[in-house]
Amino acid sequence: MSELIERALQTSTDTKAVIAGESAIAQVAEVFRSTFGDRPAIVVGDERTMAVAGDAVVQQLTAAGIELAEQYVFPGEPELYARYENIEVLRDALREVDAVPVAVGAGTLNDIVKRAAGELERPYLVVCTASSMDGYTAFGSSIAVDGYKQTLNCPAPAVCLADWTVLAAAPAEMTASGYGDLLGKVPAGADWILADAVGVEALDDYVWGLVQGPLRASLSRPDALAAGDEAAIGELTEGLLMSGLAMQAHESSRPASGAEHQFSHLWEMEGHGVDITPRRLSHGFKVAVGSVSIAALYERFLERDLSQVNVDDAVAAYPDAAGMEARSRAAHQPHLADEIVAQTLAKHLSPDQLRERLELVRSSWPDLKAKLQAQLMPAAELQRMLRAAGAPAHPYDIELTWAEFRATYQRAQMIRKRYTVLDLLLELNLLDELVDELFAPGGFWAEQE
């Protein structure tokens, strides 16, 4: 285990141990017993994950004399989806067994077990089977409830075990998905800088360091990741685990999620990529395209001199609450509209509040612009890195139509109350104008259509 992870564990609220490295599975029985004592275990996986790691976990626990309940194994086909109905099924099965769940899987399976165990107020252990996302060590589960993808509260795992050899053997697209998810922390960090600057959500220096400290190193070897290099996959995994521990420490996904994730969440809520076979479009792949999209928007934004912004004009153009609600309802499917309106109005400002915010931005712009430039990377460079890792870098790569993609810039702003660059640009009455520039001749996306 690295010093970074060891330090992060000192402030984690739920996770007591992370076993990460070569042959980590050989330590599963030892860490289970040291954490849970003589309690029985129940291994939960699907047919795929049991084959790649679950059977080995069962062997290790059995050899150590740990009592095992009958395994709970989801089908391998169709691919498991993180919908609440699957949580209910697992929770009801676990309720009949007094045992600690041992989840063996990646993002979806971990989220399902995490929430089911949380509803039963039981701790659990997760054995990672792919470096595909940052949620292993995070609190909360990303679950579709009545079609609306949201984060449901539940504790993080008591133990996380990541075996480099197992992770390196995972399908290459899953590793690329993890790379896309981690790369999203670049624009997400910029959004947190913005939220801090306008007084919406203060930046926590310690938590910031957990994510941003190892980030550039974890992203530095996309070519090696695509080649299945075990050391590079270990570096990527460390970055993902640190991101999860940061969310746990902050009790929020703010350290790891900004507007780029809102692009992804919007597409997920509307079912984009759910029916793709043989493997549905991953969260990390959607975040990858969202990250390029937001980086390109930031580039246009930072060309403006906000110290000269006309605050009166911006305040006059800002919709009132009724106008904001109408805008949200017109842009989204009826069955999602009520929740989206609630999220939109949670961050709506009165004219006086908006004026105060924009005056603050105007007066602090030189310093704020410098901080944003230091955090961000060029959109074209992000595309290069993603393609080297085998991840998508263009909306066509994830089968979005051009019209759907362009509309995402406005529509994604509405779906979460989290403050991002999309909100500030709406408040400045610049969002539509800058999006137009991105797609106009000479704009970032015009050259790639």
Image (tube, rainbow, N blue to C red):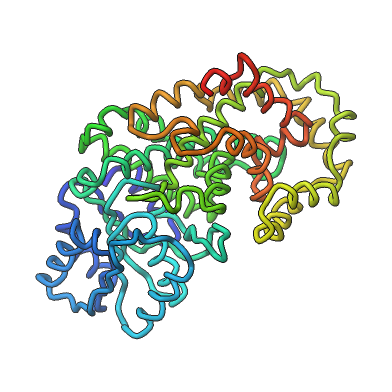
Please tell me which residue is depicted at 41% across the width and 34% down the height of the picture: 392
> In the image, residue 382 lies at what x, y percent?
45, 26
Left or right: where 268 falls relative to 5: right
Please tell me which residue is depicted at 66% across the width and 39% down the height of the picture: 195
Q: Nearer the viewer, residue 304 or 367?
A: 304
Displayed quadrant of residue 229: top left
Query: Looking at the image, is 238 positioned above or below residue 82?
Result: above
Please tell me which residue is depicted at 25% across the width and 49% down the height of the picture: 20
Displayed quadrant of residue 353: top right
> In the image, residue 155 lies at what x, y percent?
45, 64
> In the image, residue 403 lies at what x, y percent?
61, 35
Left or right: where 26 falls relative to 103: left
Please tell me which residue is depicted at 61% across the width and 26% down the height of the picture: 298
Q: Nearer the viewer, residue 77 or 151?
A: 77
Can residue 371 be seen from the camera position used here?
Answer: no
Query: Looking at the image, is 272 positioned above or below residue 443?
Result: below
Q: Residue furthest left?
A: 63
